[in-house]
């Protein structure tokens, strides 16, 4: 009986095998995106705000040195591009040449573990640095003349998260804004019971909310954005819980930089609150009208809606890119602060990818 011959690798490992593999990866799949970002963007742009906020005096030379904050920030960008967990991010950097090349790690360099990645992100959240970094790149886009100022567009997208299984009483308390009073231990609890309640409270998100849209129920948060109509870059992002109506964050999204521009949005952006905010900053209202019960739109209104929709539809490309190329807007994080940072990081990564696309074209 013949035994099956095992496959034997041909040849020996060469001195430049890693370099040759990296070159091939630049033209294959998602490696092209990472290579494009590295080519088009000088990430040193983000070093100063990171170092200024995270600088900590080193008292002795003992112990391992901290990782470069720019390297850690690039890991967060990489994590968001592929929508990876902290554990998966560590593994994929260890496993993939293209990942190590993007963040600036050579073969044999130490790779930050999942706890280091999580702790770094928590520091940026606590210091509200994601907003600073987003504004930093937006200022860069303005200096490059990338912001056309031919109009602004409003839109929102749900950031869904795993639904939590609470009782009706617990959900009522959370909805009333008193979620911090739940799952607290008392003096009579055993140590095991105290630990169980503490672990449960840590995993419960009392800031997320349910909402219904188009007969579909959503749970989590919503990212509201203002985009430049000419270039499709995101100018500003505000994150709320999912139950907040799209029109509520408009006064926070607009400012004096928008004066004299048309403001476009779908029929959700209605009401006196939106009209006052646009009027205050001299923004021309180009909101799509909706018909009311028992009253059809006039011919002129339908014509204007058609014209407005051509501009408004451009903002759909932003969230379309996030859904397809960034693997969706779903979030694994707990709490408003973390998810607000997640929304800002998402639109920052979108702007980075959009800038790479524009410069390449």
Image (tube, rainbow, N blue to C red):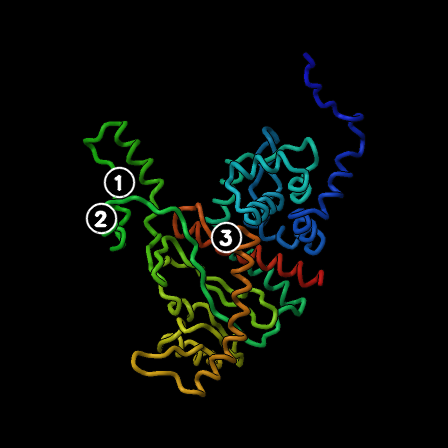
Number of other residues with Cα within 10 Å of mark 1, as a class: few under 14, some 14 to 19, many 20 or more: some
Label pair 1/3, CB-CB below 8 angstroms: no
Cα separation, mark 1 vs mark 3, equals 32 Å
Question: What's the residue at 72%, 48% (across, down)?
Answer: 27
Image location of residue 135, percent across then percent down: 56, 61
| Of the image marks 2 and 3, the number of the one nearer the N terminus | 2
Depth order, front residue of 219/349: 219
Is residue 252 shown above or below 95?
below
Is residue 118 shown above or below 338?
above
| Of the image marks 1 and 2, the number of the one nearer the N terminus | 2
User: What is the residue that sits farthest to the top in this orientation?
Assistant: 1
Within the image, what quadrant is residue 165 found in? top left
Is residue 177 shown above or below 142?
above
Tell us which disc is closer to us: 1 or 3: 3
Q: Quadrant of the N terminus?
A: top right
Is residue 20 shown above or below 81?
above
| Of the image marks 1 and 3, the number of the one nearer the N terminus | 1
> Residue beneath label 2, please?
168
At numbered mark 2, what does the secondary structure look like: helix, strand or loop? helix
> Residue beneath label 1, please?
183
> Residue beneath label 3, please?
328
């Amino acid at each position: 009986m013949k035994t099956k011959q095992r496959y034997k690798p041909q040849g020996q490992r060469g001195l430049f095998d890693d370099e040759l593999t990296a070159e091939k990866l630049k033209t294959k799949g998602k490696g092209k995106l990472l290579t494009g970002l590295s080519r088009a963007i000088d990430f040193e742009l983000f070093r100063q705000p990171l170092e200024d906020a995270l600088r900590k005096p080193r008292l002795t030379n003992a112990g391992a040195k901290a990782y470069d904050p720019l390297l850690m920030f690039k890991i967060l960008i990489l994590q968001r591009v592929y929508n990876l967990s902290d554990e998966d991010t560590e593994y994929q950097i260890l496993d993939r040449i293209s990942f190590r090349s993007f963040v600036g790690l050579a073969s044999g360099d130490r790779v930050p573990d999942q706890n280091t990645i999580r702790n770094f992100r928590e520091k940026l959240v606590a210091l509200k640095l994601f907003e600073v970094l987003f504004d930093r790149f937006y200022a860069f886009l303005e200096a490059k003349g990338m912001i056309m100022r031919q109009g602004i567009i409003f839109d929102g997208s749900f950031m869904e998260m795993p639904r939590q299984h609470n009782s009706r009483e617990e959900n009522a308390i959370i909805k009333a804004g008193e979620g911090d009073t739940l799952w607290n231990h008392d003096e009579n609890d055993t140590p095991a019971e105290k630990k169980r309640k503490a672990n449960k409270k840590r995993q419960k998100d009392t800031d997320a909310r349910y909402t219904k849209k188009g007969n579909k129920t959503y749970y989590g948060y919503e990212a509201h954005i203002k985009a430049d109509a000419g270039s499709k870059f995101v100018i500003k992002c505000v994150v709320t819980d999912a139950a907040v109506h799209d029109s509520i964050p408009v006064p926070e999204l607009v400012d004096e930089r928008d004066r004299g521009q048309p403001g476009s949005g779908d029929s959700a952006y209605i009401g006196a609150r939106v009209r006052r905010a646009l009027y205050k900053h001299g923004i021309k209202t180009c909101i799509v009208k909706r018909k009311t019960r028992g009253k059809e739109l006039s011919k002129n209104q339908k014509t204007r809606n058609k014209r407005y929709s051509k501009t408004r539809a451009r903002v759909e490309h932003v969230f379309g890119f996030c859904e397809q190329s960034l693997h969706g807007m779903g979030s694994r994080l707990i709490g408003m602060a973390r998810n607000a940072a997640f929304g800002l990081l998402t639109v920052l990564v979108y702007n980075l990818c959009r800038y790479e696309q524009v410069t390449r074209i």
